[in-house]
Image: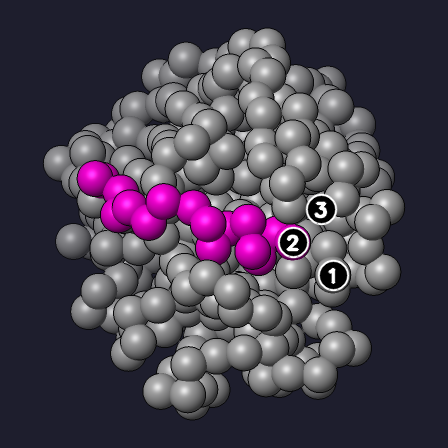
Amino acid sequence: MTRLLKKTAAFIAIFFSVSFAFAIRTNFSGLTNKVCIDLPEGFKLESAAGENSFQLQSTIAPVHAIIQIYGKGKFKNTEDTLKTSISKLKLTADCGTFMWRNNATALSVFSGNIMGIQSSGYGAAAVIPENQSIILLLTWADEKDAVFAKPYMESLIDSLYVDIESYFSAGVLTTFTFPKEGTQDIRLKIDGKEISTSLDKSDKKAADYLIDREYKVLLMYQKSDLWKEAWQRYYRMIFRDSSERLLQAGFDISNALAPDCKDSTELAQKLLTWTQSFKYEREKTSSDFASLPAILLGSGSDCDSRSMLIAVLLQGMNIDSMIFVSAEYKHAIAGLVSEHPGFGFDVNGKLYLTGETTAKNITWGKIDSSQSDSTKWIPVELP
């Protein structure tokens, strides 16, 4: 035990020297709220140096992590940052670079002896456009736990936001794993209009992967007091990944429908009526959530995937929306900020009219009276 503690102390000293308070979804010193890490819930701080260096351990999964920001000029580039950091720890790694958020980004899979224990994990280094600093993420688990912890570590690597646009685009790992393959044309029929739009050929595969991965992470919280927060993060991750994938569809839908609408609520109603016409079908996957590209390609869907589809499209049209989920009611609904009268839930001083996606001919601002207790709904706020 003494020998292990000494190894742990030496390892921490590579990166850290003093303690510092840490918030899970935090900004970093000298940076705006564009830069954020939306870590899986339940991490605790093990050590820190200043405001930009942290070592963490999850209380939910057997996973460790390091977050470090290096100032501009400290390393030549992201690949140098990642390789140098992994080399310090004497680990074996495969490293690659690719473009993410308009900058060369480095990603690696590594293994080796960490704190006296054979371990494996992931590393990523990305440019923060605001000041050209580089943020480094390392996450690992003991080799015996690596298969179980794999989705958790992958989710952690994907939880980085380096600029405003990254709140609406796929994360580092998903972008690397599913490169663009070229567009495929699709046709939608909304409010009697035929609308031509497109998706990338990789979008469904990528979205299905992310949903499956994040659901595996969510299952780790079944017996945790953090299950509500984990559920909210699950939907945030889906929203983020879906936003850019559906950006072209939202643009084409808006161009086709908005000219005939008096206001944004009328446009939102056309989308709500459209989703109410979908074939109701539970997904034959463990997550039971139809990916949004799959819905546009004609797959069946149920309440939470439809509500998320509306929220993603409306947010892309700069219309304030969100979703609400309920464990008690086993249901999900959409929410819309509107000046129109109707029933809604107050979230941070804004009234969100409720939108039921699974019953036909229901307008915004109406809800089944048996499901109107706001305390039984969990709001999922979106960027």
Point out which mark residue 266 bears. Answer: 1
The residue that appears at 24% across and 56% down in the rendered structure is: 220
Please state which of residues 8 and 329 is positioned toward the viewer in this rendering.
329
The stretch in magenta equals 270-285
Dot 1, crowdedness within 10 Å: few (<14), some or many (≥20)? some
Task: For label 2, count other residues whose C-alpha is less than 10 Å away and answer few (under 14), some (14-19) or many (20+).
Answer: some
Residue 50 in the figure: left or right of residue 301: right
Q: Which residue is mark 3?
A: 316
User: In x, y percent, where is residue 75?
Assistant: 70, 24
Query: How far across and down, in percent of the image, does residue 96 sit?
Result: 52, 13
Determine contact: label 2, label 1, CB under 8 Å.
yes
Q: Rounded to the nearest whole Å, what is the CA distance between mark 2 and mark 1?
A: 6 Å
Percent x, y of residue 356? 48, 67
Asked if residue 55 lies left or right of residue 260, the reply is: left
The three-letter code of the residue at mark 2 reads Lys
**Secondary element at image label 3:** helix
Residue 270, label in figure: 2
